[in-house]
Amino acid sequence: MAEQLDLSNAGNDRESTYQSLMPQVEALISDESDLVANLANVTAVLKQAFQFFWVGFYLVKDEELVLGPFQGTLACTRIDLGKGVCGTAWAEKQSQLVPDVDAFPGHIACSSESRSEVVVPIMLGGEVVAVLDVDSDQLDDFSQVDVTWLEQLAALMARQCFS
């Protein structure tokens, strides 16, 4: 069965695009039990809908974040707790909104083209099981709108994919 993303109800702003995407993502992942398949499809949805520079997941494995499904350029494979934006989101158990990655202390430059970033932890039972990492090649490309909707997406994924 071919999957299709419908962006016809999305407006010209991110808020309305997220509103349009959320029920589609929920339908896409609700009947699929495979974690990798769901993570891969969610990265594809976000990349297609927003044309982000890089979208992907890092999974907590053996006290490291390990690269999972992603869309974009070559990525860092492993990230330690507290290191870079992803490791900080994991350690602090909270989203990180970074308008300029070069100004973030300890930023890990997987790609020199990345300029801003948002990372949202996926929580299960009070613990981080993965992080959703979204990068832009534009400075200050993300806002609280992105954080809010990506946190809702992370909560949905925790319920549907990680429980």
Image (cartoon, rainbow, N blue to C red):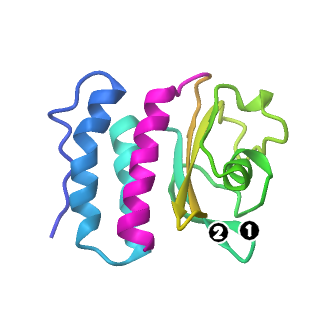
User: Tag 1: residue type?
Assistant: Glu
Q: Main secondary structure of the magenta part?
A: helix
Above-or-below relation of 69 to 34: above
How far separated are the C-alphas under marks 2 and 1?
6 Å
Q: Relative to residue 60, is residue 49 drawn left or right?
A: left
Labels 2 and 1 touching (C-beta < 8 A):
yes
- Label drawn at residue 60: 2
Dot 1 lies on which element? strand
Front residue of 117/147: it is 147
Residue drawn at point x = 37 percent, y = 57 percent: 156
**Magenta span covers which residues?**
140-163
Q: Relative to residue 79, is residue 31 drawn left or right?
A: left
For disc 1, the marked residue is 64
- Image coordinates for residue 24, horizontal then vertical, percent: 22, 51
State the residue lying farthest toward the right: 106
- Image coordinates for residue 135, horizontal then vertical, percent: 58, 39
